[in-house]
Amino acid sequence: MPKKARVNDDAAGAWGSVTAAAASTGMLGAAFEANFQSIARQGQGLATPVLESLLKFSAEGGDMPEFGPGGLDVAIAALYEHDEQFIGAMRGIVTHEKDIVKAVEWWTKAAEKGNVLAQVRLANWYCANHDYLKFEHFVALAALNTPIGDKQYDAKITDALENHTSNITTKREGLKVIRDMYGLNMGDDVVEAFAAPMTCAPPHAAVNLTHHIAKCFMNGIYGIKKNLQISKDYLKLSAKLKGTKKYVEADLERLRGCAKCGGTGAWACALCKVTRYCSKECQEWHWFNGDEPHRDHCPRAETPSKYAELKKITAFDLQITSFA
Ligand SMILES: [Zn+2]
Ligand SMILES: [Zn+2]
């Protein structure tokens, strides 16, 4: 029975070896399932109880936790989802970085195998990330797979639906904060279009709502006028959230690159100080040419950075953090 497993890139392999060893010694059983489900229902998420079960199993042996259908996927998702505080307790058993995108991959595997709690987790995740089609898909799946009369699963689904409502409020209020802070000329219709449930998938992938907002301003969608300064501020804000930094960094890098050729963005536009260029040639070309000539799209001094102010809005930030 191995007491240590390393979960790095190949979490499946690591857990495969643990379960194979457990199975070979006859320890993989369903006995842990009832216990797991009772503790999982107490927490907001699944990660803590799953990791606690694994920690207990690792330290004391006994029955290998099974976690219901798609159980090992749930366990691996929990390992990727949890923050450093718990990782400290797990030190010596697993080593890995929090990685919310990988966690979502493993929740998805569990959900596909019929794990209701993973389905609810994903409903909440997609709701927070603006993808209402997937939100509805996973809520419907969870409802379909919940045993009739199971009050605790029903309560989780109700919570997910309430999250959906509060998420719309969060987005509406969040965009109004941006509008006021940056002094944007933005109509209420744009705010409502942004906050309202979408009837199609979002046009860009994001790992949390701040990241999503950053991309909306980067790409200029939902009637929001493209604004790279706001995009940059929100990318920086999003990068502060645990487990998401590396995904946000890629977008920040893109903003830091030359807007014409993608090369090293050594110089910034003298007016807006946001759009970058590798050379005078690229800057001159971009001023007059391309799909969006910069002379027409430069935010100029109209939108100075508000990042210092923005990062103090902890309530808005925290509401998002709780999903990410
Ligand atoms: Zn260039
Ligand atoms: Zn400019």
Image (cartoon, helix red, strand yellow):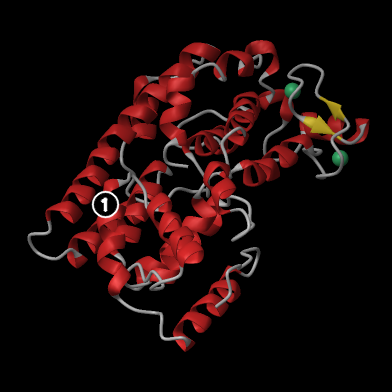
The local secondary structure at tag 1 comes to: helix
Q: Position of residue 84 (x, y in %)?
A: 58, 43
Q: Is residue 106 visible?
A: no
Residue 249 falls in image quadrant: top right
Q: Looking at the picture, how far across and down is residue 6, in whole percent?
A: 64, 65
Q: Is residue 175 left or right of residue 301?
A: left
Q: Quadrant of the N terminus?
A: bottom right
Rendered location of residue 262, percent (x, y): 80, 45
The vertical placement of 88 against 165, above or below, is below
In the foreground, 221 or 70: 70
293, above or below 54, in the image: above
Residue at image point 55% right, 58% down: 102
User: Which amino acid type is marked by label 1?
Assistant: Arg
Q: Quadrant of residue 134?
A: bottom left
Residue occupying image coordinates x 14% and y 66%: 147
188 in relation to 13, above or below: above
Q: Position of residue 65 (x, y in %)?
A: 39, 69
Report the residue that reaches farthest toward the right: 280
**Which residue occupies the extreme left position in the image?**
149
Q: Which residue is mark 1?
A: 41
Residue most extreme to the front? 60
Q: Residues within 10 Å of mark 1 (few under 14, many from 20)?
A: some
Q: Residue furthest bottom?
A: 24
In-image side of 302 versus 164 (left or right): right
- Whether residue 273 is visible: yes
The residue depicted at 65 percent of the width and 24 percent of the height is: 229
